Image (cartoon, rainbow, N blue to C red):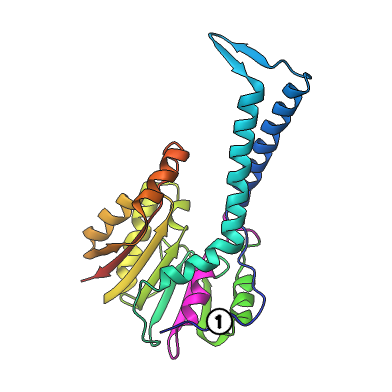
Amino acid sequence: MTANAPRGRTDYGLDAPGVVRNLLLVGAAGLLVAAAAWQRLLPRIVKLGPVNLDLLGSGRGIGLGFLLSGLGMIYGSRIGKLKRRERLLDQLSWTGREQVLDVGCGRGLLLVAAARRLTTGTATGIDIWRAEDLTDNRPDATLANAAAEGVSDRVKVETSDMRKMPFPDGAFDIIVSSYAIHNIEEPGGRDAAIAEISRVLKSGGYAMIDDIRHYDQYLSNFAAHGVRLVRRIDSRIHSLFWMLLTFGSLKPGTMVVRKD
């Protein structure tokens, strides 16, 4: 099915606001150091042991790099992710009758977009509403976005930990999750989340997991619960680019899996 256009004003928040703030602060500091070295308020070259550090060049490079990264995250949160969500959901087949679960729904980016593809189905979102993951992360903000896009009658939200969901086995035809599971720091906790997704996914149902790291862990855990990979839908080049840029901190990957 083709999704209807949004009807009103929505706000899906700024992802990882603390990270964005730190990137902008480091970027600004780097440019200030470069400017001070250029104006000779600081020495151009500083000796650090056997290394001669060029404050002008290093400050400029670090400043621009961090500043552009921060601005890129702001663009992605405010504009890019709205376009990307439709491309992600287009990877799944829709009849309009599905029971959909968004794991770690936040302010409803995928939840509301999925609901727009439904007629008699329902989209349910769960979250623990941590503000450090998303600005102003709360259930009524999610419901406000659902109302703005005209899908209030098809959306439900619950406060629930993805490691222990309050749903019966096989309750959902489609499960989606974007940039959420990695927020569980303990590997065992992420294993538990994948086990729960596998449990509440209906036989023959599909799950789409979009995250910034731990792709291989998710895939192996799905396989252990009888959920097999259908296809990987992200760009390997894109994943490699972010892995190199962040020295291995980020390694994005998006998978579509099916429960046998």
Q: Which residue is mark 1?
A: 5
Q: Is residue 203 left or right of residue 29?
A: left
Q: Is residue 164 above or below residue 250?
A: below
Q: Is residue 127 magenta?
A: yes
Which quadrant does the C terminus fall into?
Answer: bottom left
Please say whether residue 166 is visible from this viewpoint.
no
Q: Position of residue 97 (x, y in %)?
A: 38, 88
Q: Is residue 61 above or below residue 224?
A: above
Reply above or below: 92 against 213: below
Q: Is residue 212 or residue 193 the one in the foreground?
A: 212
Q: Quadrant of residue 256?
A: bottom left
Q: Residue at x 64, y 28 (%)?
A: 59
Which element is circle 1 on?
Answer: loop
| Residue 127 place in picture, x, y as percent | 51, 65
Could you tell me residue 172's position as x and y percent?
A: 36, 77
Q: How many marks?
A: 1
Residue 27 visible in the shown view? yes
Which residue lies at the image location 72% right of the left edge and 15% below the top edge?
A: 43
Q: Which span is picked out in magenta?
A: 109-135
Q: Residue at x 34, y 79 (%)?
A: 93
Q: Residues within 10 Å of mark 1 (few under 14, many from 20)?
A: few
| Quadrant hosting residue 6 | bottom right
Residue 110 falls within the magenta-colored stretch: yes
Q: Position of residue 75 (x, y in %)?
A: 60, 57
Residue at image point 30% right, 50% down: 216
Quarter in which the N terminus is drawn: bottom left
Q: Amino acid at mark 1?
A: Ala
